[in-house]
Image (cartoon, rainbow, N blue to C red):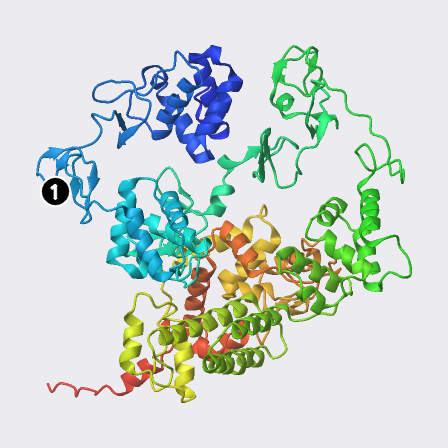
Amino acid sequence: MTAPGHPDRVLADPVGVIVDLIAAVEPRLGTTRIHAVVSSVAGGRAKSRRLASHLAEHPGVLTDGRSPAPRAVGDLLIALREAGAQKVSPPCCAECGRHLRTLQRRGQDWYCAVCGPQPEPCAACGHDRRVASRDRAGGPRCGKCPDSDGRDPIAVIHTMVAELDPYARQEVIADAVRRSAPRPYYQQRIAWALESQPGLLTGDGHLAPLRAILRLIDLLHTAGIAGIVRPACPGCHRVVTIDKPLNGQRVCRTCISYTRLEECSRCGARREPATRDDQGKPLCPNCLITDPANLEICINCGRRRLVNTRTPDGPLCPSCPPLPLSTCSICTEDKPCGTSRITGRPCCPDCQRRSAPCSACGRLTAIASGTVSRPLCADCTAPEVWHTCPTCTDPDYPHPGQCVRCLINQRLNDLLGPASSSLHPGLEALRHNIATTEHPTTARRWLNKPSIAPVLSDLATGRLALTHQALDALPDSPPLAHLRQVLVGVGALPERDEHMTRVERFLAGLLASQHDPDQRQVLHRYTTWHLVRRLRRRNNGRPATPQQFDSVRHRTHAAVSFLNWLTAHDLTLDACRQADLDHWLTDPSATYRKTAGHFIRWAHTNKLTTVHVPAHRWTGPTQPLDDERRWDIARRLLHNDTLKPEDRLAGLLLLLYAQGTAAISRLTVQDVDVSIETVRLRLGEAPVQLPEPVAALARTVAANRKGHATIGALTPSPWLFPGGQPGRPISTTQLTKRLTQLGIRPNQARSTALFQLAAEIPAAILARTLGIHTDVAVAWQRLSAGDWANYAAEVSQRTRKAPAQP
């Protein structure tokens, strides 16, 4: 058995460690009651681990109640005393030793109400006393010198609101004030703030000095008080909850997260840290949930995996549905039960976690089968005698009851109806593809999704036409996008450029939301006849990429933001002057300043304005280039056979041939020319002959490529790196994630490779072989000092000195 304070157990089962430590001090309280109290206080995994770690290192705090200790320890002691614990000590004041029922803290120490507050000089009388309140200037006031003007703050606020809406009822306003600030002192502060800044109620709420003012505005707006305007976030201009202080303003949660971006110490992604490791380095949310220390044992399948759902009985992984109510095969009680992977019978979570001496071998271990009185371990459990499927008599299905394919056919009958000639040919092809899929369990789980089943049923009954336009009318969601690609993959729908369609739908909705006709006309010219037209010309029939969609969206939002700023300052695009533009560039409330420069330059070129913003000139990579680390990773990919071949090939194409993730994901089998002796890869106009062992990797990947699409996948796939959606290549996001797990930072690694190649290869050859533009190749060659033309010209202009006369 693992000791209660063992570090491994603290990480794996912190709540169990806390329960064991408390039960050793207070055995009469019972583990069930202790577990309930601990669960209510411990909170999430990080907090419960900190609590377990401190109690394991300082178990004496349970009996003496002494600080220093985290706040959670004090809350736990108070909760245990309220639950009836006698031997557990309540928290004690660090100065006088008095038992506490509530906590006041300074750092890690607890103090009582007498010792805790620090005296300050009163702003009125000047005596060092306990601070009871603060005046309107923020100065401390003692209990004898309150800053009160004798007015009722609710009446003051009602007078101000009545100026906006004379029909506003006083009881409604009073209720809103009390709900936003229950204490009279805080109500008075709200009244002072509104008197000094009346505009807070009419749209300037982002300047509110108190958070309660924003709650008051929301309550008044919800109550239908006329004239009350909910403030917009000064960063993104959305009307959402803004309660985060930033530079004297209140911003939304999204904008505050952008100010906290840090580079994750594991994957290198720039995100807001979800937590920090033992060394204080930031960890992004993805690395936090995938950390092995955060994996937990699923109460259904018994595997240590990510937690998808937390139930009163324990965690469930993403692959397991909620537990059905069944009779446990061990304790014979009716409880939510999972299915034992050993016996195939129902087993409740309590019995899965139970350990007892085996009635056959006598070892103290986990129970696998048997009964409570005669438990059996896994080694002594007789294997289940499986029966064939009662419907199709399939002997290869190792589970009781109907096999998965029979269950799929039954589900297809429920959704699409029985197979008949009246069913649409495209849906019949979909039905056949699902019924004969290689992974029936995944297909069955997909059919049971609440976002998929109703759509398939409507398509089969004719309530929904089998067209792209009919699917466009449904709410956009990732499952619907996957269903569309499945229908395209089986031939039920024609292929179309989805990202270009997203661009058109986005622009149509944005233009329709513009109320100013002049502004709508300018945006229509800029987006439709410039951005979209240039995008179509560049793609030349090729489908658009997610990055191109994001570029159009960001530039459109930047144009809208700049035009809205002009409107807010009583300006138009034609009347804007360079001084106004300088004001916009220095205005802290302005957004998209860098991206909006593209719209301003377009407007200047089309003579819609006289102002101009210079383009941002690229001066080379901003991150340091580490060529030695690049070659170390390349050697590992060349010779480490334990890694996946497709990951190794993608990494080598980036490290050795400077291919971006978007270019790698779009490679097809036609780009790989495999012969008996050589392997040529077409990255640009001229194919590149791959050396060994890169050539062997390319042969392996081209021969064994396989995507993750279960339904509607084309066989064989035309893509060299198939993706999760049928008929689609791997997404750049997924490819970047897989390369990051190999220790490769795509942008930095590609810059390092281009820098080295440009120093050794002429720009024309570099552009033809790598598939980059000639101007890009010339710029990199000039940056890497690979262009010796300037040096030759400088040498030719040197004056030769005459030889010295003897």
Would residue 680 appear left or right of 144 to someone viewing this image?
right
Would residue 498 appear left or right of 26 to someone viewing this image?
right
Q: Decide which of 624, 146 is in the foreground and name it.
A: 146
Establish if 217 lies above or below 31: below
Would residue 19 appear left or right of 469 to someone viewing this image?
left
Which image quarter is the C terminus in?
bottom left
Establish if 296 lies above or below 618: above
Does the image show residue 436?
Answer: no
Does the image show residue 391?
Answer: yes
- Please tell me in which quadrant of the rendered image residue 787 appears: bottom left
Establish if 211 lies above or below 117: below
Residue 219 in the image, given as x and y percentages of width and height: 42, 51
Residue 349 in the image, given as x and y percentages of width and height: 63, 26
Residue 533 in the image, given as x and y percentages of width and height: 55, 81
Q: Residue lying farthest right? A: 421
Disc 1 residue crowd, few under 14, some 14–19, many 20+, Cα 10 Å: some
Residue 234 in the image, given as x and y percentages of width and height: 36, 62
Q: Which residue is mark 1?
A: 123
What residue is at 57 percent from the left and 54 percent from the top?
647
